[in-house]
Image (cartoon, rainbow, N blue to C red):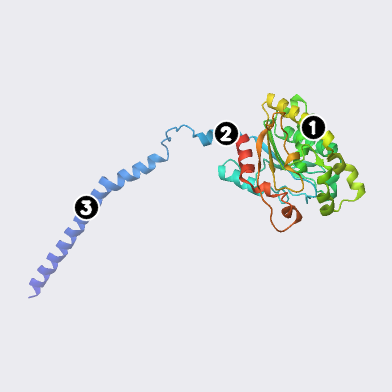
Amino acid sequence: MRGRCTTYSGLVSWETRTMRKRFLVVLLALTVLIIQPLITYVQGLQFKPLPPYPPSVADQAAAESRNWFIVFLNGLTTDCDGSPYRNMGFRSIRRHLVKTGHYRYYDTRFLMYSYTGGQFRNGRWFPQAYTSDDTFQPIAASVAHLRELVQEAAREHPDAGFVLVGHSLGGRIAFDYLDTADDQELERIRGLVTLDAPLLGIGHQALTIPVLILELAPAKKQTVVEQLLVSHDQLFAREREVVRTIESLALKNIQVITLASRDDLVVSSRWSVATRPDGRMASDGAVVSAGRSHGTWLRRTGHVQILNHPTAREALASILGI
């Protein structure tokens, strides 16, 4: 009995060893046939150069627009605490640019205009803090600060070009800057978008609402508000000047888009766009219905709704070609 048990045990041990050998053979075969080629392929990917693909239209547009800086100019009674983005505004327009894939919401190519100037630090623009009182300074002083901003940005970024986007008084400042800029300055400008900007001025009959709401003091009226006052007798002469400036900028390939809301009680659409004698608008743009809403006096008078209107986003995108 004892011998038989030894023989049976030896047989089981032999069968076990045989099964293990077969398993190792199968595993080795799998390694050779499947695993090893897979490892070789993966290793090859680390060194094999990817085939060159032609850039997409979007990539080409991004390359062309990467050096276009956008200067955002706010209007009367705004303020700034000195931070690059907190008081920048133009949120709807900036979000739209983000969706195009060409800009970020907090993009260093977004420059916030300040009524008191600013400076570049480590390649980024920092507007100097200003209060609402500073916005009432003479237009020439505000234009000078814009000129300094563009010049400083050009020195900091020699390959930069600029698009100006101004709401209300900010649009008028940007327009007057282009009107007084020399050819060397204009070479860097791609376009201008004005939003409910008093390009022609403010009519005497329309001044009641701004005075009542803003509670302008007589001393303040002697500066920017007084400069914007235009009588009907002066209106057509001012309109001819604006038309000539727009046509002159067009000859230099600088596109001007003027947008106005017919619902705005602060700056009438009649004073926000310039028309030729035949009634056609001198620039690209449109008069739209942006509406009014509850809230601040600016919303109740319909003066800020243009910032969220689709045409504002589309205007800037069209100038940038994106």
Q: Mark 1: which secondary structure? A: helix
Across the whole image, how many numbered discs are drawn on residues? 3
Q: Position of residue 141 (x, y in %)?
A: 85, 38
Image height of 242 relative to 41, above or below: above
Q: Mark 3: which secondary structure? A: helix
Disc 3 target residue: 26
From the viewer's perspective, is the residue at label 3 or at label 2 nearer?
2
| Residue name at image x 37 percent, y 43 percent | 42
Disc 1 target residue: 236
Distance Cα–Cα, label 3 vs label 1: 95 Å
Q: Quadrant of the C terminus?
A: top right
Disc 2 target residue: 63
Nearest the camera: 189 or 160?
Answer: 189
Mark 2 or mark 1, which is nearer the start of the sequence? 2
Mark 2 or mark 3, which is nearer the start of the sequence? 3
Mark 1 or mark 3, which is nearer the start of the sequence? 3
| Residue name at image x 75 percent, y 27 percent | 244
Distance Cα–Cα, label 3 vs label 2: 55 Å
Q: Quadrant of the N terminus?
A: bottom left
Mark 1 belongs to which amino acid?
Answer: Phe
Q: Is residue 235 visible?
A: yes
Q: Mark 2: which secondary structure? A: helix
Mark 3 belongs to which amino acid?
Answer: Val
Q: Position of residue 291 (x, y in %)?
A: 67, 51
Crowdedness of circle 2 by 10 Å Cα count: few (<14), some, many (20+)? few
